[in-house]
């Protein structure tokens, strides 16, 4: 018997979910074994119901629609949808968020609501956190969707306009969340450019069938299904989507950036400037301003796009707050940004307002022109444009209030199909990095000796490389997954569940990664996850932990914690407590009691970080809603120095 827990009270539609699952099972018995043509005839009949006005969430549509999806999955993939998956699918069909633990089968759960909403024929957008997952889900589910007589498309990052339009003409379109937002902005630009044309031209275009509306990519925004909804709407929503273009030439103010770097290199912290303890802010002191404006020629350079001291501030930030292989990588002479929560490398994103150029100057690269923004929208405002918004995640806990407040989305928790067999081993605390790395190598060696596969999660590419060097020195075989290697990501992930494999990975191996165990690995205790450092946000840790013990498999997890960890440095009270414990010879720092006391302290700090970020997102949305602008007007240049 499935018990449903709605975090905000339990409206009838959610209380009835077990009955709705039973209705789907009954309907599937009636159509079981039907051939493809019969299934498609049922879909066509349902389509007429929905287009005549039956709600997608009406009992008939839910029961028959759910049954058709179950039957198609069975016939094409040979899998029988579990009750918990149907429950999650129903929650989405009712326009809510299903919280379903990691590994419980969200990919298949999202299929039923996608098919049901597609019956209304205006296109369903299924958004994933990244293009790897969009492609994977599209490839897995397309045969099932086509078996039902519907069409599916996928928006690839490098796809041309015509391929994008083709994907949008499908009943169900898979893509990373940001791709839908950028295409919306492109459509708005198309409409806006046409509105400026002369009336005669507009009439001629309409008569020839070349009116802007015929050149739009999207058919509207009827329904968005967001897989890993907390990533798409929360983690990724700290910055707006900005559609921009750049001239492919060196920046006119390149020499100024280089001069600013030289000045910044000579400035001393606490004498010329102050850095905020959490690394987010930087303030110049009077002595710093004095030093920066010592050369009057630089302050009056005609190529300045901003005040001269702001160039130096950008250069200081580039040196002190942006770390290579942590915040960005440098490949083929270009700075590429690393996404902090997924570990993915963005091919075509840049920091704005001169920060990217300051980092290029720091790295001694060609300094590119600043991008010109054409259109922008916050992800919050964009996803609120959909008639129906729903989604699923394994980690809604901690952001349910924000989903409710910003998107009016209730979160409904789906219970585990079978009890979890994950063992959480006591946290190991160390004084510093060096000791930690040695102990992680020892632990992985022991796992390997008993054929247990190990996945070690690191925060940054730099951390993963440091750990990899230790493993090399220790003569242990391992695989490295950090986005910098040429090796195929899917192959590395497939290999990481084999007996005795050691995989070192950034967050790339977190969210959405499905690691299959071989028999020997299962017999050896399943995947052992080592979290080498707590993340600032607890949902990112839980995603990594969720790679083990999936679908009732065995598995284990262990956290490491040191006095040098950023989260410990953020919270002096944790640092003091930890230091006492580590230096006290009476207490073994890795005992269960220690872990039980440390965990809530870390959780409290992670909660604070989450709230801080939530406030930033609220401010971003409020500003965006207040202006309601999409198209960015060219800025008039104004350069002001500091009056001394
Ligand atoms: N009904 C089913 N029968 C058999 N296997 C299933 C079924 N549903 C899902 N699986 C398998 O379970 C594994 C986990 O599924 P999936 O990756 O969709 O989980 P998830 O909930 O999205 O995980 P995560 O939260 O980590 O993204 C996959 O290997 C999938 O093939």
Image (cartoon, rainbow, N blue to C red):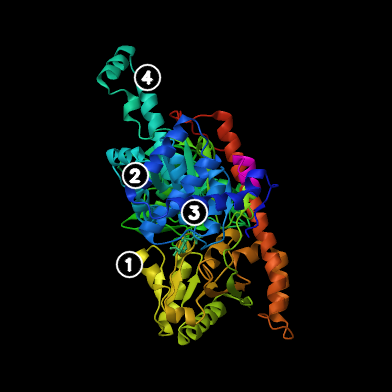
Residue that label 1 marks: 487
Question: Which is more N-terminal, label 3 or label 1?
Answer: 3
- Near mark 1 (Cα within 10 A), the count class, few <14, some 14-19 or many ≥20, is few
Residue that label 3 marks: 109
Residue that label 4 marks: 196
Quote the CA–CA distance across marks 1 and 3: 31 Å
Q: Is residue 442 left or right of residue 206?
A: right
* Numbered mark located on residue 149 in the image: 2
- Residue 40 percent location from the top left of the image: 36, 44
* Nearer to the camera, 103 or 17: 17
At 60% from the left and 49% from the top, the residue drawn is: 283
* Nearer to the camera, 618 or 413: 413
Quote the CA–CA distance across marks 2 and 1: 37 Å
Question: Which is more N-terminal, label 1 or label 4?
Answer: 4
SS for callout 3: helix
Q: Quadrant of the C terminus?
A: top right
Question: What is the magenta range?
Answer: 401-410
Q: Residue furthest top?
A: 200
Quote the CA–CA distance across marks 2 and 4: 41 Å
Identify whether 52 is placed above or below 561: above
Identify whether 284 is placed above or below 483: above
SS for callout 4: loop
Q: Residue furthest left?
A: 208
Q: Is residue 602 left or right of residue 350?
A: right
């Amino acid at each position: 018997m499935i018990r449903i827990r709605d975090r905000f009270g339990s409206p009838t539609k959610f209380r009835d979910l077990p009955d709705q699952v039973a209705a789907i099972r009954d309907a599937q018995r009636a159509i079981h074994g039907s051939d493809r043509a019969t299934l498609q005839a049922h879909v066509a009949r349902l389509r007429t119901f929905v287009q005549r006005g039956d709600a997608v969430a009406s009992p008939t549509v839910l029961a028959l629609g759910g049954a058709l999806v179950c039957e198609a999955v069975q016939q094409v993939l040979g899998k029988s949808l579990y009750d918990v998956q149907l429950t999650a699918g129903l929650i989405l069909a009712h326009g809510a968020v299903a919280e379903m633990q990691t590994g419980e089968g969200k990919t298949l759960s999202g299929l039923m609501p996608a098919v049901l909403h597609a019956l209304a024929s205006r296109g369903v957008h299924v958004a994933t956190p990244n293009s790897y997952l969009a492609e994977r889900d599209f490839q897995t589910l397309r045969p099932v969707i086509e078996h039902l007589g519907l069409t599916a498309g996928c928006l690839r990052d490098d796809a041309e306009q015509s391929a994008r339009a083709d994907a949008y003409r499908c009943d169900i379109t898979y893509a990373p969340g940001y791709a839908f937002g950028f295409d919306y902005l492109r459509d708005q630009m198309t409409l806006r450019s046409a509105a400026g044309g002369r009336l005669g031209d507009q009439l001629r275009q309409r008569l020839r069938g070349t009116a802007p509306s015929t050149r739009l990519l999207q058919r509207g925004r009827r329904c968005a299904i967001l897989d890993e909804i907390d990533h798409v709407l929360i983690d990724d929503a700290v910055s707006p989507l900005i559609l921009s273009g750049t001239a492919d030439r060196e920046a006119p103010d390149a020499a100024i950036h280089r001069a600013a770097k030289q000045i910044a290199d000579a400035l001393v912290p606490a004498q010329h400037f102050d850095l905020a303890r959490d690394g987010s802010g930087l303030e110049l002191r009077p002595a710093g301003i004095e030093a920066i404006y010592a050369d009057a020629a630089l302050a009056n350079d005609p190529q300045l796009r901003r005040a001269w001291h702001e160039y130096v501030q950008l250069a200081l930030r580039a040196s002190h707050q942006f770390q290579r292989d942590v915040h960005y990588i440098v490949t083929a002479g270009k700075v590429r940004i690393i996404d902090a929560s997924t570990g993915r490398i963005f091919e075509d994103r840049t920091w704005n307002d001169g920060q990217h150029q300051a980092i290029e100057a720091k790295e001694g690269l060609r300094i590119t022109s600043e991008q010109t923004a054409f259109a922008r929208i916050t992800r919050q405002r964009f996803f609120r444009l959909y008639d129906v918004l729903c989604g699923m995640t394994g980690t809604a806990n901690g952001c349910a209030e924000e989903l409710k407040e910003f998107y009016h989305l209730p979160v409904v928790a789906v219970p585990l199909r079978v009890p979890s067999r994950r063992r959480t081993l006591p946290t190991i605390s160390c004084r510093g990095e060096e000791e930690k790395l040695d102990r992680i190598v020892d632990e992985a060696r022991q796992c390997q000796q008993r054929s247990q596969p190990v996945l070690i999660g690191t925060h940054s590419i730099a951390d993963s490389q440091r750990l990899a060097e230790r493993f090399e020195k220790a003569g242990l075989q391992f695989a490295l997954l950090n986005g910098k290697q040429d090796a195929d990501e899917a192959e590395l992930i497939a290999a990481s569940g084999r007996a005795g494999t050691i995989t070192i990975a950034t967050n790339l191996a977190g969210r959405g990664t499905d690691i299959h165990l071989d028999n020997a690995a299962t017999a050896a205790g399943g995947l052992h996850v080592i979290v080498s450092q707590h993340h600032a946000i607890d949902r990112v840790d839980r995603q990594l932990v969720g790679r083990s013990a999936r679908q009732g498999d065995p598995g284990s997890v262990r956290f490491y914690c040191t006095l040098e960890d950023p989260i410990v440095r953020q919270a002096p009270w944790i640092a003091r407590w930890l230091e006492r414990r580590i230096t006290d010879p009476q207490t073994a720092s890795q005992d269960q009691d220690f872990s039980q006391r440390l965990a809530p302290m870390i959780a409290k700090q992670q909660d604070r970080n989450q709230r801080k970020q939530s406030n930033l997102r609220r401010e971003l949305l409020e500003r965006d809603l207040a202006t309601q602008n999409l198209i960015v007007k060219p800025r008039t240049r104004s350069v002001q120095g500091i009056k001394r």
